[in-house]
Image: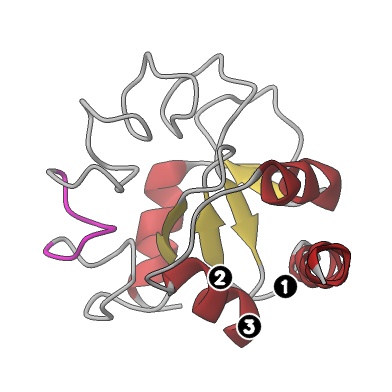
């Protein structure tokens, strides 16, 4: 059962890694933590919602928290670290993955992290040397009205 779940997850991540429109895109940290979606300025899970869990500059799960794990210019998993090699991933919209990542029981696993690494997805990062880099500030603006 666990092998089936891992293979299914890998297939979903591989499909979601393909480039496509930003509407509904999922942002996931390199450690497997869900960091929000690209769903407009007022959507609950959107990184463009400045009052939401994923867009607030005060939230621990926001790439816009300049003191947090995912937004500090010094943190290795941060979108704003100009020299990171562990920037968050941008995955194409997937209702199945959104349900997985927003489930109360979701916990990142080594299999999820491995699947993210193998996905070839674009990265949201200030590191211009990283292939497929999307500037976090540009992404936020694009996500306000995808």
Please name the residue that numbered disc 3 is placed on.
96
Please tell me which residue lies in front, 25 or 6.
Answer: 6
Residue count near mark 3 (Cα–Cα under 10 Å), binned few <14, some 14–19, many ≥20: few
Image mark count: 3
Q: Secondary structure at mark 1?
A: loop
The answer to whether the residues at label 2 and label 3 have Cβ atoms under 8 Å apart is no
Foreground disc of the pair 1, 2:
2
**Which corner quadrant of the image does residue 84 belong to?**
top right
The percent position of residue 89, horizontal first and vertical second, equals 61, 48
Write the residue at 87% across / 63% down: 3
14 sits to left or right of 69: right
Which residues are the magenta region?
51-57
Write the residue at 77% across / 42% down: 114
Please name the residue that numbered disc 2 is placed on.
25
Name the quadrant of the N terminus: bottom right
Q: Earlier in the sequence, mark 2 or mark 3?
A: 2
Indicate yes or no whether the magenta region holds residue 55. yes
Disc 1/disc 2 C-alpha distance (Å): 9 Å
Write the residue at 54% across / 65% down: 26
Foreground disc of the pair 3, 1:
3
Write the residue at 41% across / 28% down: 80
Foreground disc of the pair 2, 3:
3
The percent position of residue 102, horizontal first and vertical second, equals 42, 71
**Which corner quadrant of the image does residue 63 belong to?**
top left
Please name the residue that numbered disc 1 is placed on.
20
Specify whether residue 38 is in view. no
Disc 3/disc 1 C-alpha distance (Å): 17 Å
């Amino acid at each position: 059962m666990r092998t089936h779940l891992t293979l299914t997850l890998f297939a979903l991540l591989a499909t979601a890694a393909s480039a496509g429109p930003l509407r509904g895109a999922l942002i996931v940290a390199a450690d497997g933590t869900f960091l929000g979606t690209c769903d407009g300025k007022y959507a609950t899970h959107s990184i463009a919602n400045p009052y939401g869990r994923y867009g607030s500059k005060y939230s621990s799960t926001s790439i816009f928290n300049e003191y947090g794990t995912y937004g500090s210019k010094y943190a290795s998993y941060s979108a704003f670290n100009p020299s990171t090699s562990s920037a968050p991933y941008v995955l194409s919209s997937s209702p199945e993955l959104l349900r997985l990542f927003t489930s109360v029981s979701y916990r990142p696993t080594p299999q999820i992290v491995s699947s993210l690494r193998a996905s070839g997805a674009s990265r949201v990062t200030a590191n211009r040397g990283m292939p497929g880099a999307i500037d976090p500030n540009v992404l936020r603006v694009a996500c306000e009205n995808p």
